[in-house]
């Protein structure tokens, strides 16, 4: 054998051994003493470790050996176990030593953090946590072996192995808490002794714990605390007595309400008494609490008075409508509504002395459905005087009120200084489809760059819902805005009615108008041609597309999408190089609708345009074009950039684009949009994550179950149902325990049931 061949053979034989000889650097987690002062706190910190094993099970065994050897007294005879598929599932079993139960939290936290750091998916403790733990289940990363009893009392999140009793005994925390809860003298006497001998910190802890543990004896034990010189202790005692509707407690609270030197303490006592079932205590306390300067106390009293049988409550609630807190005013109005005193709220809304503080009253009126007239009054008030969000919501809701009062109010809103409100008001008038509103809409500025199109669209919507003769009358109108809207509506009528004669007659009416001297009329004809497009109109459309008036160009740029062909594409490509934002946006939108690949570079170059209309249409066009591309990977960077656009609509469109790309990074990008300030963007991102079918979407979707918006949480549940993966069950079951919305809890249960099938 040649020397070189022998050398190669030796190297190939030795390589596996050399590879095994190099240890693997990793970390394990260890509870290390951190604090110098008492109580001694132990913090879970990473420590360096080196492993020799290559297989998953071997590495976990090495780590377990290190953990046990470091804390033999804590681990005792704890054992490690695996199932045959451990390397695939990543699941590790740890059997805890029952004789070392007080140290179980240490063992469980160290093993979970260490093993998951090194490839485990979770750790199952067959008797202590048979469902298994991940890091999210570890309740604390700082542990105290021993602390004073009052320091470990609930609702404190501190955890301790042992507690030191006031008499010096050292006992397991769980045993002490069970003894106190059962009110056994050997535990409860030391517990209550802090009230006489402990520092103020201990007294406050005991008071708080007595309520958390639902101790019945607190009804008498805490009464002396109501006379403490410490305001904090008196306040805490009142809070801990909540729910104890007993005569001796009520008498003590009444004394505080009447005599305590601190107004806030008196108010808290009054609030507590106001909830009593005994009217001898409740009525006077409710009236007292309603006058409190603490808005939470006064609002709570106002809410309680809504259920009172005392007729006198009406006068007190009416007076509270002038309270300096909006929270109280709203609560008082809601209670008056419950007591069928709607007229009192309406009168207050009209009263000049309430004018500065009347939005809350208007909100209450607008939210109810018992009295449609007063609801309309509330909405009209909010439309004119509410903040932006309130005005926008009122404008939208008033669409359902098809009467002169609502229409006049919406007409005024069409003249507002705020463009968004002008648009929303016009939409609502258009949605009513009432010819009477045409004159109202005609008063608005249809040439306004921001809201003019919305006004014309609303008028067009009204004309399109009428008979052909009414529309013909509009075309002959002397009012330019009505004429333009009627012309555009003609296309809608043709599209929605059957019969060739309708289209032929409409075309004959519009053809001469395509040569009108007024560019706005020519533009309206172009818009109508889009809706009744056929080959016979191509010559007229070609002439309009060559028109030099900017109004006609804008309309033609949109309408040409209904006339596919090279001539239309040529016009659109030329438009897409011009500077006018609306023209540019319409052209890009049409190129996208026609899926014209020659426009790809033009479209991508406009994605970052400074006008939002252009960015929206460029993004939408790229989505449409992207569907036709064989190589979609380059789209990822384009749509990822759009995720950070200032406009919510652009961000929402970027989601559709991301779905075109088959790449694991898409899930990361979509997850980022779950923090978007726009609810609809968050919802679209959730549904997109589910549509991808990627199991990695589970974690992202699960985070949305904690969203503040109920609609987003509902969408997250829909996403889990759409993803249809049993891996989501633990997340859904955990969510079920903390969801406060009854409807969403029911939906969660339904999704869980469907996934189990």
Image (cartoon, helix red, strand yellow):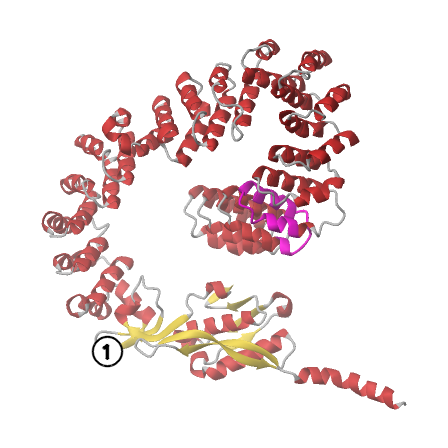
Asked whether 233 or 453 is in front, the reply is 453
Residue 365 falls left or right of residue 316: right
Place of residue 428 in the rendered image (x, y in percent of width and height, measured from the top left) = 48, 25
Say above or below: 685 vs 340: below
Place of residue 286 in the rendered image (x, y in percent of width and height, measured from the top left) = 19, 40
* Total numbered badges shown on the rendered structure: 1
| Secondary structure mostly taken by the magenta-highlighted segment of the chain | helix
- Which residue is identified by label 1? 168
Q: Quadrant of residue 337?
A: top left
Which span of residues is magenta-colored? 637-666
- The residue shown at (43%, 75%) is 98
- The residue shown at (51%, 14%) is 435
Say above or below: 165 vs 620: below
Q: Can I make out residue 290 in this image?
A: yes
The quarter in which the N terminus is drawn is bottom right
Query: Is residue 657 magenta-colored?
Result: yes
Place of residue 222 in the rendered image (x, y in percent of width and height, measured from the top left) = 17, 58
Q: Secondary structure at mark 1?
A: loop
From this viewpoint, which residue is outermost toward the left?
Answer: 259
Q: Quadrant of residue 170?
A: bottom left
Asked whether 229 or 149 is in front, the reply is 229
Few, some or many C-alpha atoms within 10 Å of disc 1 (few <14, some 14-19, many ≥20)? Answer: few
Place of residue 255 in the rendered image (x, y in percent of width and height, measured from the top left) = 10, 49
Residue 189 falls left or right of residue 142: left
Query: Is residue 481 magenta-colored?
Result: no
From this viewpoint, which residue is outermost toward the right?
Answer: 1
Asked whether 336 or 546 is in front, the reply is 546
Q: Can I make out residue 728 in this image?
A: no
């Amino acid at each position: 054998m040649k020397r070189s061949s022998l050398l190669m053979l030796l190297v190939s034989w030795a390589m596996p051994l050399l590879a095994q000889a190099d240890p693997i650097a990793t970390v394990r987690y260890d509870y290390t003493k951190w604090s110098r002062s008492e109580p001694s706190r132990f913090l879970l910190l990473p420590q360096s470790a080196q492993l020799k094993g290559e297989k998953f099970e071997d590495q976990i065994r090495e780590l377990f050996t290190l953990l046990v050897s470091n804390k033999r007294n804590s681990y005792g005879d704890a054992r490690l176990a695996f199932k045959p598929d451990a390397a695939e599932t990543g699941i590790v079993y740890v059997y805890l030593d029952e004789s070392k139960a007080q140290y179980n939290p240490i063992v469980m936290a160290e093993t979970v953090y260490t093993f998951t750091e090194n490839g485990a998916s979770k750790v199952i403790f067959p008797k202590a946590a048979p469902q298994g733990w991940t890091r999210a289940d570890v309740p604390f990363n700082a542990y105290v072996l021993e602390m004073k009893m009052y320091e470990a009392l609930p609702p404190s999140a501190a955890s301790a192995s042992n507690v030191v009793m006031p008499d010096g005994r050292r006992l397991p925390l769980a045993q002490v808490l069970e003894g106190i809860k059962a009110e056994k003298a050997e535990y409860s006497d030391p517990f209550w002794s802090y009230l006489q001998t402990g520092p103020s910190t201990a007294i406050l802890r005991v008071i708080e714990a007595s309520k958390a543990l639902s101790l019945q004896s607190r009804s008498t034990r805490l009464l002396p605390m109501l006379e403490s010189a410490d305001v904090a202790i008196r306040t805490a005692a009142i809070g801990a007595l909540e729910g104890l509707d007993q005569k001796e407690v009520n008498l003590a609270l009444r004394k505080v309400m009447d005599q305590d030197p601190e107004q806030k303490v008196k108010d808290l006592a009054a609030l507590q008494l106001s909830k009593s079932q005994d009217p001898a205590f409740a009525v006077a306390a409710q009236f007292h609490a309603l006058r409190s300067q603490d808005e939470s106390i006064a609002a709570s009293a106002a809410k309680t008075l809504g259920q009172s049988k005392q007729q006198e409550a009406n006068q007190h609630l009416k007076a509270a409508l002038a309270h300096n807190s909006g929270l109280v005013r709203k609560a008082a109005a809601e209670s008056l509504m419950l007591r069928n005193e709607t007229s009192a709220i309406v009168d207050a809304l009209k009263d000049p002395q309430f004018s500065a503080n009347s939005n809350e009253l208007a909100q209450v009126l607008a939210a109810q459905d018992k009295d449609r007239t007063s609801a309309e009054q509330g909405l009209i008030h909010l439309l004119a005087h509410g903040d932006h969000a309130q005005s926008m919501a009122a404008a939208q809701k008033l669409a359902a009120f098809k009467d002169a009062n609502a229409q006049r109010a919406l007409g005024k809103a069409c003249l507002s200084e705020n463009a968004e409100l002008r648009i929303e008001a016009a939409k609502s008038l258009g949605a009513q489809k009432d010819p009477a509103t045409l004159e109202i809409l005609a008063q608005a500025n249809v040439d306004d760059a921001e809201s003019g199109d919305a006004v014309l669209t609303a008028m067009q919507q009204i004309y399109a819902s009428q008979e052909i003769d009414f529309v013909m009358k509009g075309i002959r109108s002397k009012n330019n805005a009505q004429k333009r809207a009627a012309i555009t509506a003609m296309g809608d009528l043709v599209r929605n009615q059957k019969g060739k004669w309708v289209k032929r007659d409409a075309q004959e009416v519009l053809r001469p108008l395509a040569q009108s001297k007024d560019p706005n009329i020519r533009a309206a004809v172009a818009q109508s041609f889009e809706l009744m497009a056929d080959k016979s109109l191509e010559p007229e459309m070609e002439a309009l597309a060559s028109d030099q008036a900017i109004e006609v160009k804008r309309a033609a740029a949109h309408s040409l999408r209904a006339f596919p062909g090279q001539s239309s594409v040529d016009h659109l490509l030329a438009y897409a190089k011009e500077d006018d934002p609306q023209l540019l946006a319409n052209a890009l939108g049409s190129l996208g609708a026609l899926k014209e690949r020659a426009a790809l570079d033009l479209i991508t170059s406009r994605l970052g345009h400074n006008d939002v209309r252009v960015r929206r249409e460029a993004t939408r066009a790229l989505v449409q074009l992207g569907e036709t591309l064989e190589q979609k990977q380059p789209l990822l960077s384009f749509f990822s950039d759009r995720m950070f656009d200032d406009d919510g609509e652009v961000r929402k469109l970027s989601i559709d684009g991301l779905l075109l790309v088959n790449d694991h990074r898409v899930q990361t990008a979509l997850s980022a949009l779950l923090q978007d300030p726009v609810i609809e963007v968050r919802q679209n991102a959730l549904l997109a994550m589910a549509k991808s079918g990627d199991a990695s979407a589970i974690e992202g979707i699960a985070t949305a179950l904690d969203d503040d918006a109920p609609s987003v949480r509902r969408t997250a549940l829909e996403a889990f149902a759409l993803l249809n993966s049993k891996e989501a069950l633990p997340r859904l079951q955990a969510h079920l325990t903390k969801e406060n919305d009854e409807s969403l809890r029911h939906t969660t249960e339904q999704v869980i049931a469907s996934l189990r099938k």
